[in-house]
Image (cartoon, helix red, strand yellow):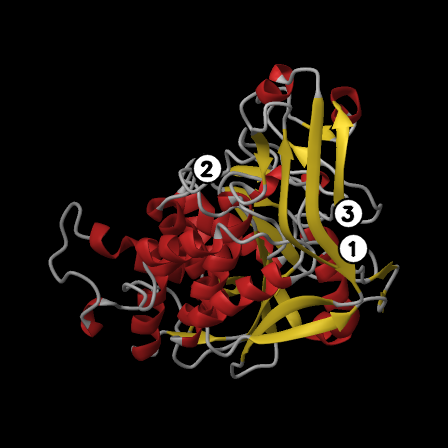
Amino acid sequence: MTEQTPGHSGSEMMEYARRLFPICRSLTGDGVRETLRIIKEICGDLEVYEVPTGTKVFDWEIPEEWNIRDAYIIDPDGKKIADFKENNLHVMGYSEPVDKTLSLDELKEHLYTQVDLPDAVPYVTSYYKKRWGFCISENTRASLKEGVYRVFIDSDFKQGHLTYGELLISGKSKKEILISTYVCHPSMANNEVSGPVLAAFLGNCIRSLHNRRYSYRIVFLPETIGAITYLSKNFEYMKENTIAGFVLSCVGDNRAYSHIQSPYGDTLADKILSNVLSFIDHGHMVYSFLERGSDERQYCAPNINLPVCCFCRSKFGEYPEYHTDQDNLELISEEGFEGAFNVMRDCIEALEHNNYYKVTCFCEPQLGKRGLYPTLSKKGSATAVKAMTDFIAYADGTNDLVDISNIINVPVAELIPIIKTLKTAGLIKRVK
């Protein structure tokens, strides 16, 4: 899309990130529902589904639904040293309810810190084993004094549901592009709210495309168990129709661009993302599938094997604030969102136009008589049309658009108007 895409801006995306940030999300529960309700404000036809506790999904089972209302620790002086209402990372995810007094030594068995970031509150969960705990900074833990502490967690487990959202946008073909992101982390900005916000705005961008070639499947899921659940219901259709897919994670900061490859790095999604990033950021990071960590694990798993890779700004686990309360709204920015949006917009545009083209005449076509080449020949006169002549030189029917872009070192976005011009002049045809 060479012109400004309607319906998005970095400031709009930051506004929604600010609204989503305070919500306490987990694998299940009301926080996920509230998150999807806000996402639906961006892309109004989002469908929300609920899968009951106990449902078998491949080798897994939907856990009990967990919700939490309050939690805190009160020290011997009557001061709150961890308060869920101030920072929802203070409580270990899926903590059991508790209301008791403890000695300092007893309390320390339920405290979690991150020693390498002594001022940070870490993000810790215990989804599949019942326990309770609090997360505090290492400096706070070191300052605790002997005495009696009161701990209180007002949470509950019930036979409820796992909740996810799905946005399907149809095109001329049933062949699909998958965009997947997750909605299960509490108040962290880059490693949570950036992905759903970007995916929702991309949905609006895709809907604005005229004559869409492909259909698009955009899903908002609890990480791991949500993707497994979704695949258990849809993977046969997806295996038949998905031609490329992208997991979006940590896409709001402005430090880096990152590509986590599919298992062999050879899918169309890998090819497209690599091409787009090569023109946007020559220093972008490329990680093998051995360094996976998000839902690309599920989409690329044996017996599923979808053509999916992962796109990040700073990769999960590679930036110091990851999985702590320092991954806050100051870490993401309008510029970070805009950069991520532009990458994915260009990937979508490349996919929509990625055909094999072949020149229709023998030898070089005479561009001048068609008004496509300078009629005065002198040094430098061919420079203005070099991208066109280079495209023609490799339009032999064996290279697709991205191949030619890579060979002649011209972005796909700049080749699209050239293709339109050459097609209008009858000089190239699509061969497959």
Marks 1 and 3: which is nearer the front? 3
For numbered disc 1, what is the local secondary structure? loop
For numbered disc 2, what is the local secondary structure? loop
> Residue 146 location in percent, x, y?
70, 15
Categorize mark 1 by other alpha carbons within 10 Å: few (<14), some (14-19), many (20+): few
How far, Cα to Cα, is label 1 from label 2?
27 Å
Does any portion of residue 106 appear in the rendered image?
A: yes
Label located before the other in sequence (1 or 3): 3
The three-letter code of the residue at mark 1 reads Ala
The three-letter code of the residue at mark 3 reads Glu
Residue under pointer 3: 96
For residue 89, which quarter of the picture?
top right
Marks 3 and 2: which is nearer the front? 3
> Residue 327 location in percent, x, y?
50, 37
Residue under pointer 1: 301
Does any portion of residue 245 appear in the rendered image?
A: no
In the image shown, does 120 or 212 lie closer to the viewer? 120
For numbered disc 3, what is the local secondary structure? loop
Residues marked 1 and 2 touching at CB (< 8 Å): no
> Residue 281 location in percent, x, y?
41, 40
Identify the residue shown where x is 60% and y is 37%: 323
Residue under pointer 2: 256
For residue 47, which quarter of the picture?
bottom right
Q: Please determine whether, in this image, residue 384 is positioned above or below residue 278.
A: below
Identify the residue shown where x is 69% and y is 45%: 153
Label located before the other in sequence (1 or 2): 2
How far, Cα to Cα, is label 3 from label 2?
38 Å
